[in-house]
Amino acid sequence: MPGLGTSFGRGGATTAQQSLHESDAIMIMGSSMAEQHPVGFQWVVAARERGAKIIHVDPRFTRTSAMSDIWVPLRAGSDIIYLGAIINYVLQNNRYFHDYVVHYTNAPTIIREEFKDTEDLGGVFSGLQVDKDGQTIYDPSSWLYQGTKAKEGEPTAHHPAAGGHALRGAAGGGHGKDRGGEAEEPSEHQEDETLQNPRCVFQILKRHFSRYTPEMVEKYCGVPKEVFLKATEAFISASGRDKTAAICYAVGWTQHSKGVQIIRTAAILQMLLGNIGRPGGGILALRGHASIQGSTDIPTLFDILPGYLPMPMFEADANRLADYIKKHKANKGLWSNFDGYFVSLMKAYYGEKATAENDWGFNWLPRVTGDHSHFGYWLDMADGKMEGLFVMGQNPAVGASNGRLERKALSKLKWLVVRDLVETETAAFWLDSPEVQRGELSPDSIKTEVFLMPACGQAEKDGTFTNTQRMLQYHNKSVDGPGDSRSETWFIYHLGRRLKEKAARDPRPMHEPLRALTWDYSTHGSHHEPDAEEVLMEINGWTTADRKQLQKLTELKNDGSTTCGCWIYCGVMPSPDLNRANLREPKGKLGHGWGFAWPNDCRIIYNRASAAPDGKPWSERKKLVWWDDAKQEWTGEDSPDFVKNMPPDHKGKGKEGMWGLDGDQPFTLHGDGVAWMFVSSGLKDGPLPTHYEPLESLLENPLYPKQQVNPTAKKKERSDNSYAVSPADPRFPYVLSTYRLTEHHTAGGMSRTLSHLAELQPELFCEISPELAGELDIEHGSWVTVVTARSLISARALVTPRIRPLWVNGRRMHQVGLPYHWGWKGEVKGDITNDLLVISEEPNVRIMETKALVCNVVPGRHAEGKAALDQLKFYLQRPAA
């Protein structure tokens, strides 16, 4: 996630769940952790039992709220106002951790004179322009540090001939290493450690957040001033030399049109309070179930290679490896070995065929040519530009925004392969979907050939998960899968084997990458299942001369002598007999010896910051790693996330690589070695978080009336993806937010088919307050219809004070909550909540907005068949009563 990546250097959670029990306060916001991460929530409960204050900020009173000391209900989509007001309170009352801020953040750094803030330009930053494709983008050159220059080879909007910022705005995602902020060389920048220079980051920050006040929180978040102050004091009082506080978040922050900047706001707050890299502190990004973290580390994303190496882009990265390396390699810090990580990956892909003479196979890699994200290719699919699709471990017919559009788009394919445990709605879209029932699609006319292939469950296969705290855990197969079911490893391996055999028979150059690909894993059993540990060994890496397993990522070389499938995982299997992901002997308070956390089994990253600049712990109570003067090395209760033998007083000036950093610079993936309050490069929507309203909103932007929404967000508006008028569409007077339940799993394919889970949550419901129910004459348990600009669905009314009306800008505002797990298959059935949502793309990671839209609620159940479309048309044409 670039909100964390640009702030600290890595996009992963900065801490471990076990460390939460050492917290003096925990703020959970953008998550119902007790509901969605109940196993990890045990550590929150442990912290509370030790006296920590638990604060839950959420529009709904959930199971997490019930276990918290303070619940703060707020208006969905107003998170930056709320967090920005905490930042302003900290700054105005001098409650920040001064020594941490001066030494470990870029607060003293002076920014260029050309930089203009949103306060100067009415809601936008300097550099905003429109590219040749009509897209609103930023040229970040005015955001750079004073005394530095844009990194050579880094395109900006002023260099479109190089592929340029215009292409990056259109094609680039936001997950790669450059979202860690390597677009400039910050070694010669200017600083003011007194924090008084008006252009230093600290003073810019104070001005930027000066209008984010408790009064604004009360007026526009709907949070009474006294509640805000109580929660704020509880959190910031638990921070300092002898105390630490943690923040936990999940998709309640990410799934916004400004989601990355919400996370950035939290990061700035934690920097000010000195909570990063310390036990009981940090930011815990609560990833999705099982291996969502792993699916970005070993990516299923279109814009990165394993370990967050950026995918080369058409034109922007040209066809020469030297240009690509020059653009992405840094002089200092961990990214100074970018070429070692990349060449080792190419050797893992292509083995002996990757040589210095052919740039290690660089030109065999595909190029990013456009928006290849989920929504990008689904819109292409709807326009007839795609022929086929593999769907594995997903059920987009239920689980994705604007389900009507996505299901119709599937009908434009020539072929569709679905691998799952059961027949999902995606596999059956052509047969009995709402569109078929309503006459929008006909099974007789759909030409898509669907292949439904049975998949194994997790207990039926070997492999690893990488969980929310960057920890790999190996799982061993318990039983064989039933019938013809197969694992993903089996499916991908044998598909690749067949493709390689076909390529070997066809001498055309287009097949050269497949012919070169290494694909030689051992198989076992009657089904010829590939050996999952061999895959993990390849991911760990070995020396090419003697295939000796590598011990740590610092061994990776750029000369072809090492191979590594993912540099950040190096060390997980340092010998054929030692699979560290399969260890089950936890020791110490952070659980070392249970699994393997990247990097280097480090459980709390940036942990050099747990000690003062002189290497001594900030306090005995909060010690984690420290400098052992006798041994001349870093030691402590965690693996040091630092050069083990670099003394605290080391000076890196004039040096390169890791030794180019100083001994008191803990954030080793940034070229200046510090955490970034101000992000001078790497984000597409500004160097500082700014409040914008959701893409659909009932309010005018209270901070910047002339700039309603994030100027670089992509609405993807079209006839089949329509929006409400914003602000204040009279047809849609209520705020809509979607969420998940403990009892069901995402799109329901793994839970709605199980009788005991179906019994626990048997029916789709809509949470509304007693006040709204009274206004609309709705009884608890009766049917209601929820309408947006895209679709309409029906659900049972759950009338509950757990979701309250808020007083916002002088009027009462109602919010509506809907879980999204139901579809038309399984033991329990229901309408598809995600049909209500709109396809949109946050500018950095292209995620959709699901947590703050607008809707109408109407008593009664919607009509069936074609009459439902007539009913929707009626609601869209008439103003709300």
Image: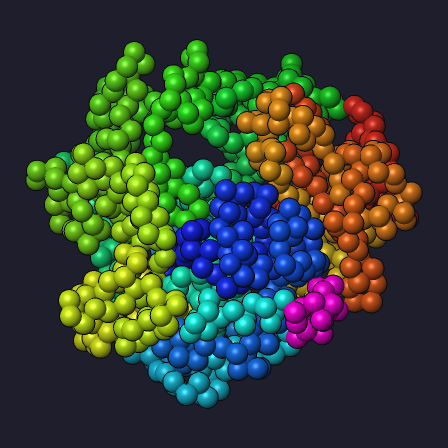
Residue at image coords 33%, 79% = 189
Expressed as whole percent of the image width and height from the top left, the position of residue 850 reads 63, 47
Expressed as whole percent of the image width and height from the top left, the position of residue 127 reads 50, 70
Question: Which is more toward the observer, 510 or 611?
Answer: 611
Expressed as whole percent of the image width and height from the top left, the position of residue 158 reads 42, 67
Residue at image coords 54%, 61% = 51
Q: Image quadrant of residue 168?
A: bottom left
Query: Is residue 200 a member of the stretch shown in magenta?
Result: no
In the picture as drawn, the residue positioned furthest to the left comes out as 545
Expressed as whole percent of the image width and height from the top left, the position of residue 692 reads 64, 63
Query: Is residue 221 a member of the stretch shown in magenta?
Result: yes
Kindly tell me whether residue 364 is visible in this rendering. Answer: no
Q: Is residue 284 above or below residue 448?
A: below
Please indicate whether residue 657 sits to the left or right of residue 594 in the image: left
Q: Is residue 331 above or below residue 213?
A: above
Q: Is residue 835 above or below residue 486?
A: below
Question: Which is more toward the observer, 739 or 402?
Answer: 739
Secondary structure, magenta segment, majority class: helix
Q: Is residue 193 above or below residue 228?
A: below
Question: Which is more toward the observer, 64 or 257?
Answer: 64
Instruction: Please state the extent of the stretch shown in magenta in the rendering.
Output: 213-230
Please indicate whether residue 778 sits to the left or right of residue 718 in the image: right
Residue at image coords 42%, 69% = 676
Q: Image quadrant of residue 352?
A: top left
Residue at image coords 58%, 59% = 54
Kindly tell me whether residue 614 is visible in this rendering. Answer: yes
Q: How many marks?
A: 0
Q: How is the image coloured?
A: rainbow
